[in-house]
Image (spheres, rainbow, N blue to C red):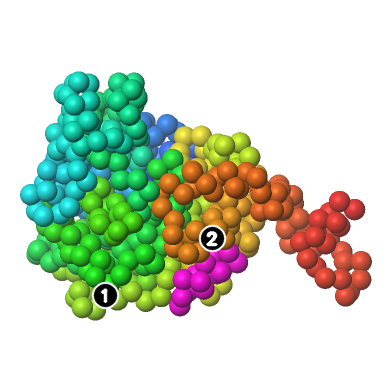
C-alpha cells in the first residue's frame, strides 16, 4: 500500500497532488529549490525537502537526487505532476529499478510514445488516423524536399522528440524548405538533444481536440470524453473547455474509440491524453500522446465529477478503475483560463517579481488551482503561470459568463498578467460561436486586442492592488454613507 508520496514538482500541480494525498490519508513529501523556499506547496505538504539551487537542472530535473531523497525518506511512490520529469522515460526507469512506484505509465509506454515518428507508426498499425506524412525521421534535406513535393505544400516540419510547440516550422513553398529544415533541426537539438525531424501535411486552421483516458494494470480502459484546446498562442494552450461545442455525437464516439485504441497500442496504464487535430469537416488525426496528467485536467473533473489524481494514485496502488464507462457522462460545460504573469503591452513577455497582493475569485462553481500567495515570487527560473481558473455552467454561455465574472474578481499586484487578454478572447465572436481554431489568436485576435487594449485594461495591476489593499485595511473613507463604492470611486479617492 502507498503510504507516502514524494511529489516531484512545484507550484499549482504540486498543491493539487498534495491535496489528493491528504484526502486519501497518504503522507505527502514536497521538494523545493532555493527559489521556492516558503512556497505554498512546501507549506501544505506534510514534509518538505530542499532539493537544490534555483535552476531546474540542479533541482527539479535532478533525477538521481530525487530518487536518493525518496529512498532516504521511505517514500513508497513518486508523483511527477506534469512537465519536468513526468515524461522522461529514463527517470521513470530509474524509479522502477529502485523499487519505487511511479504514479504514471511504465517507462516502456513513455518511451514508445516519446518519439513522435515511432508513435505515428504505432498508431497507423492500430487503425488510429494519422496526418499524412513520414513515419521515419528525414535523413537529409533533399529527401525531405522530395517528400514535401509528393504530398504537396504547405507542410509542417516537426522535431521527432518534440513537444510543447517547440521544434516546429510551417513551410509553404519549395523556396522556404531548406532554411526551415535547418532551423528546425537546430531548435530540436537545443531543446531535446535530438535533431531528428519528420514531415506532416499541414492541416490548415484545424481544431485541437484531446481525449482524456485512464487505464489500470488489469487491462481496463476508460475515456473521459474530450477537451477543446484550440485557443493557443505560440502553440501553447491558453483556454480549454469541455465538451467541445464543435463535435456531434457520431464524431465524439469515433474520436473516443480512437483514443482508447491509441492507449491500448502501447499497453498504457494510469492517466494519459490523446491529442488530435480536426479539420473543418470533422476528420480527425492523431497528433501525439501526453503520457501524464495534463494542465487542463480540471475541466474534465468538473464535467465528469471524477477525481483524476485520486484515480492515478489508486491505479498505481494496483487497484482497478473505480467506475464503469457507462457511468461516465458529460454534465454541463467547463472552461479553464490560464493566468500567466505576462505583459500584454510588451509582446506577452514574462513578468517576474514578487506578488504584492494576490486575491483569487470564488463563488458558485468556480475553482482556482494555484501554487502562489501574496508575497510569493514569480521567478525567472520557471514557467510564469500564476493559477488556473476553471468555471462550470449548465450551458456554455453560463460557463463563459461565469468565467468573465471570476476574471474580474482577480486582484494581482506586483506583476502584469494576461487577464485582460483572456477576457477579450472569451468575448470574441469566434469563441462565443465555437468557430475558433488553433490559428485564430495569432492570425486575428492578437491584432484586434492591440487595437482595443484600452477597453480591456482599465486598471493598472499595481493600482488595483494598492486600491484593494487600502480598502482591506479600512484606510479609505467614503465621503458620504450613500456613496457607491465602485472601482472608479476607489480610484478617485486613492488619488485624492
The image quarter containing residue 378 is top right
x and y, in percent, of residue 40 in the image: 49, 52
In-front residue for pair 115/282: 282
Q: Main secondary structure of the magenta part?
A: helix
Residue 395 on the magenta segment? yes
Q: Secondary structure at mark 2?
A: helix
Q: Please name the residue shown 48% across and 64% down the image.
A: 433
176 is higher (above) or lower (below) than 227:
above
Q: Secondary structure at mark 1?
A: loop
Residue bearing mark 1: 328
Q: What segment is highlighted magenta in the picture?
A: 393-406
x and y, in percent, of residue 342 in the image: 56, 42
x and y, in percent, of residue 314 in the image: 22, 65
Q: Nearer the viewer, mark 2 or mark 1?
A: 2
Circle nearer the N terminus (2, 1): 1
The image quarter containing residue 197 is top left
Q: Is residue 210 visible?
A: no
Residue bearing mark 2: 429
In-front residue for pair 79/157: 157
Label 2 Cα crowd, 10 Å radius (few <14 / some 14-19 / many 20+): few
In-front residue for pair 158/25: 158
Count of number-bearing discs: 2
In-front residue for pair 162/11: 162
Label 1 Cα crowd, 10 Å radius (few <14 / some 14-19 / many 20+): some
39 left or right of 412? left
Q: Is residue 330 visible?
A: yes
The image quarter containing residue 146 is top left
122 left or right of 156? left
Amino acid at each position: 500500500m502507498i503510504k507516502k508520496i514524494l511529489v516531484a514538482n512545484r507550484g499549482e500541480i504540486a498543491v493539487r497532488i498534495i491535496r489528493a494525498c491528504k484526502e486519501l490519508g497518504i503522507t505527502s513529501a514536497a521538494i523545493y529549490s532555493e527559489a521556492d523556499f516558503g512556497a505554498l506547496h512546501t507549506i501544505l505538504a506534510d514534509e518538505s525537502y530542499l532539493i537544490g539551487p534555483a535552476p531546474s537542472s540542479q533541482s527539479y530535473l535532478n533525477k538521481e537526487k530525487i530518487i536518493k531523497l525518496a529512498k532516504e525518506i521511505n517514500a513508497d511512490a513518486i508523483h511527477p505532476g506534469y512537465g519536468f520529469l513526468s515524461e522522461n522515460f529514463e527517470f521513470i526507469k530509474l524509479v522502477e529499478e529502485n523499487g519505487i512506484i511511479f504514479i504514471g505509465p511504465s517507462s516502456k509506454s513513455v518511451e514508445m510514445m516519446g518519439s513522435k515518428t515511432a508513435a505515428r507508426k504505432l498508431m497507423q498499425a492500430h487503425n488510429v488516423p494519422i496526418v499524412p506524412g513520414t513515419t521515419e525521421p528525414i535523413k537529409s534535406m533533399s529527401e525531405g524536399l522530395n517528400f514535401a513535393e509528393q504530398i504537396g505544400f504547405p507542410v509542417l516540419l516537426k522535431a521527432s522528440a518534440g513537444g510543447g510547440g517547440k521544434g516546429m516550422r510551417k513551410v509553404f513553398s519549395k523556396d522556404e524548405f531548406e532554411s526551415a529544415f535547418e532551423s528546425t533541426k537546430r531548435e530540436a537539438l537545443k531543446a531535446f538533444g535530438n535533431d531528428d525531424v519528420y514531415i506532416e501535411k499541414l492541416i490548415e486552421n484545424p481544431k485541437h481536440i484531446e481525449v482524456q483516458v485512464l487505464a489500470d494494470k488489469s487491462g481496463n480502459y476508460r475515456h473521459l470524453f474530450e477537451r477543446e484546446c484550440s485557443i493557443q498562442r505560440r502553440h501553447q494552450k491558453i483556454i480549454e473547455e469541455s465538451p467541445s461545442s464543435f463535435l456531434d455525437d457520431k464524431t465524439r464516439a469515433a474520436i473516443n474509440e480512437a483514443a482508447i485504441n491509441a492507449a491500448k497500442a502501447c499497453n498504457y496504464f494510469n492517466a494519459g491524453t490523446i491529442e488530435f487535430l480536426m479539420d473543418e469537416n470533422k476528420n480527425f488525426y492523431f497528433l501525439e500522446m501526453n503520457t501524464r496528467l495534463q494542465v487542463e485536467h480540471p475541466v474534465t473533473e468538473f464535467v465528469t465529477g471524477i477525481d483524476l489524481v485520486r484515480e492515478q494514485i489508486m491505479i498505481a496502488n494496483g487497484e482497478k478503475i473505480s467506475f464503469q464507462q457507462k457511468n461516465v457522462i458529460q454534465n454541463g460545460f467547463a472552461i479553464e483560463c490560464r493566468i500567466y504573469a505576462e505583459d500584454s503591452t510588451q509582446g506577452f513577455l514574462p513578468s517576474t517579481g514578487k506578488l504584492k497582493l494576490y486575491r483569487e475569485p470564488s463563488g458558485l462553481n468556480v475553482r482556482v488551482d494555484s501554487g502562489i500567495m501574496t508575497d510569493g515570487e514569480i521567478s525567472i527560473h520557471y514557467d510564469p503561470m500564476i493559477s488556473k481558473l476553471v468555471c462550470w455552467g449548465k450551458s456554455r454561455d453560463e460557463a463563459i459568463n461565469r468565467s468573465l465574472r471570476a476574471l474580474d474578481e482577480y486582484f494581482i499586484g506586483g506583476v502584469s498578467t494576461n487577464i485582460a487578454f483572456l477576457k477579450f478572447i472569451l468575448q470574441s465572436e469566434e469563441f462565443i460561436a465555437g468557430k475558433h481554431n488553433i490559428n485564430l489568436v495569432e492570425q486575428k485576435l492578437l491584432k484586434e486586442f492591440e487595437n482595443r487594449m484600452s477597453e480591456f485594461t482599465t486598471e493598472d495591476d499595481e493600482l488595483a492592488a494598492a486600491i484593494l489593499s487600502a480598502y482591506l485595511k479600512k484606510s479609505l473613507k467614503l465621503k458620504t454613507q450613500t456613496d457607491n463604492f465602485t472601482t472608479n470611486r476607489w480610484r478617485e479617492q486613492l488619488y485624492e
